Image (cartoon, rainbow, N blue to C red):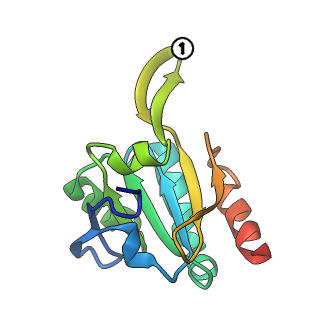
Amino acid sequence: MTYLDIKLQGIDESGSEKEYSLKDFKGQTVVLYFYPKDNTSGCTQEACDFRDNYNSLTSKAVVIGVSPDSIKSHKGFQEKHELNFILLSDPEHKLAEAFGAWGEKSMYGKKSLGIIRSTFLLDKTGKIQKEWKNVKVDGHVDEILKNLKTN
């Protein structure tokens, strides 16, 4: 099984729950971003940056956010911040592991396992075109937009 076959529950921009796999997006460019936790400061800023640049992004790609949070948590996060893109729930971190976005990280000197903030640009066949690991939130969406314009 490849990362294209992994099925996860998610919600679309209207809050409707559905099962997704990346195969569903064949023929479309995808911005797939992994973030640690709904409603934390960095994750909220990143999601709002995607939201605020939605039209520029979606003229070129589908945006999908992934975290280990539950669908219930995602719905609250989406409603609170008026998020206009798909959020996938990956509690067993299957998709995150397949992309190398799950692993050891260090916060305040303490090591733990968790989501490594990462973004992947997938081409229309589902192949990784570009990846960003250990993403810094500030300016990240602008960097993605620049990359989409050159491809």
Which residue is at a point 64% across and 50% down the rendered structure image? 132
Q: In which quarter of the image is the C terminus?
A: bottom right
Indicate whether 131 appears above or below 117.
below
In the rendered image, the residue lying farthest to the front is: 1
Count of numbered labels shown in the rendering: 1
Nearest to the observer: residue 80 or residue 43:
43
Q: What element carries label 1?
A: loop
Which residue is at a point 51% across and 23% down the rendered structure image? 107
In the rendered image, residue 26, in percent from the top left (x then y), is placed at 46, 78
Indicate whether 150 appears above or below 8.
below
Left or right placement of residue 131 versus residue 9 in this view = right
Indicate whether 23 appears above or below 99.
below
Location of residue 119 by image quarter: bottom right
Q: Mark 1 points at which residue?
A: 109
In the rendered image, residue 63, in percent from the top left (x then y), is placed at 50, 70
Which residue is at a point 57% across and 58% down the rendered structure image? 120
Which residue is at a point 60% across and 73% down the rendered structure image? 53
